[in-house]
């Protein structure tokens, strides 16, 4: 289910622009706070479109959130497929260049997964990574692969949620935080 009311084939250029603006606006807001803290009016304002267009293009706010996350997720998986050295048994899950996806995923997870459950989310990044590790490295146990993925997700979610607090607490400059973020993402 895409949650779209109109197929892209029946939309005009203006329709596509408004729909895309809604998706991008929802993505930016999901990177700022959990879905339960986002209203339709906030999405419309962030997107620069009329509130009613949410329900013109999507069956519900959740359907818009689902589409927003599916697009971010597809981009991240495509990036992984193009860049990961599968000779490495347990490759990193870097966030650099994909902070929007990681922040949105962290915010979706902030309510214990209830937001994901309401969307029927199947955790495609984690499951894709698990499948790829086991396919390329049969010597790695499923539990070991899952443990690695969970550790990577926890580290990245922690960075997404707490980096501002850590910067203040450790009195780190913006430049130092950027360097630290690169180190964490690439270690």
Image (cartoon, helix red, strand yellow):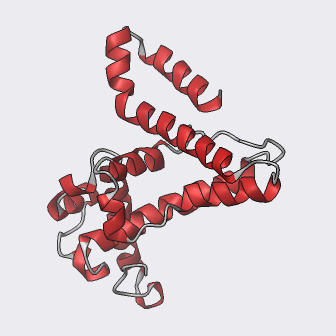
Residue at the outermost top position: 171
Q: Residue at x 62, y 41 (%)?
A: 148
Quadrant of the rendered structure where residue 40 is?
A: bottom left
Spot occupied by residue 167 in the image (x, y as percentages of width and height): 37, 17
Spot occupied by residue 107 in the image (x, y as percentages of width and height): 33, 48
Using residue 46 as the reference point, say whether residue 31 is left or right of it. Answer: right
Between residue 112 and residue 77, name the one nearer to us: 112
Q: Residue at x 52, y 26 (%)?
A: 181
Using residue 170 as the reference point, say whether residue 135 is left or right of it. Answer: right
153 relative to 38, above or below: above
Between residue 180 and residue 91, name the one nearer to us: 91
Spot occupied by residue 183 in the image (x, y as percentages of width and height): 60, 23
**Quadrant showing the N terminus:** bottom left
Number of on-image labels: 0
Q: Residue at x 63, y 60 (%)?
A: 128
82 relative to 172, above or below: below
Between residue 116 and residue 76, name the one nearer to us: 116
Quadrant of the rendered structure where residue 82 is?
A: bottom right
Between residue 22 and residue 64, name the one nearer to us: 64
Residue at the outermost bottom position: 10
**Is residue 95 something one can see in this rendering?**
no
**Quadrant showing the C terminus:** top right
Quadrant of the rendered structure where residue 44 is?
A: bottom left
**Is residue 182 something one can see in this rendering?**
yes
Spot occupied by residue 138 in the image (x, y as percentages of width and height): 81, 54
């Amino acid at each position: 289910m895409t949650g779209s009311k109109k197929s892209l084939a029946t939309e005009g250029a203006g329709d596509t622009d408004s729909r895309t603006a809604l998706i991008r606006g929802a993505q930016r807001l999901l990177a700022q706070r959990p879905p339960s803290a986002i209203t339709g009016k906030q999405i419309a304002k962030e997107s620069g479109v009329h509130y009613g267009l949410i329900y013109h293009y999507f069956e519900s706010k959740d359907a818009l959130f689902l589409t927003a996350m599916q697009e971010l997720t597809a981009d991240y998986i495509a990036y992984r497929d193009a860049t990961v050295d599968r000779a490495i048994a347990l490759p990193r899950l870097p966030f650099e260049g994909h902070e929007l996806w990681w922040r949105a995923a962290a915010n979706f997870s902030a309510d214990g997964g209830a937001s994901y459950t309401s969307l029927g989310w199947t955790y495609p990044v984690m499951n894709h990574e698990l499948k790829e590790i086991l396919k390329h490295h049969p010597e790695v146990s499923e539990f070991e692969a899952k443990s690695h993925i969970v550790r990577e997700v926890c580290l990245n979610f922690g960075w997404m949620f707490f980096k501002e607090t850590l910067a203040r607490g450790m009195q780190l400059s913006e430049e130092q935080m950027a360097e630290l973020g690169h180190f964490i993402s690439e270690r």
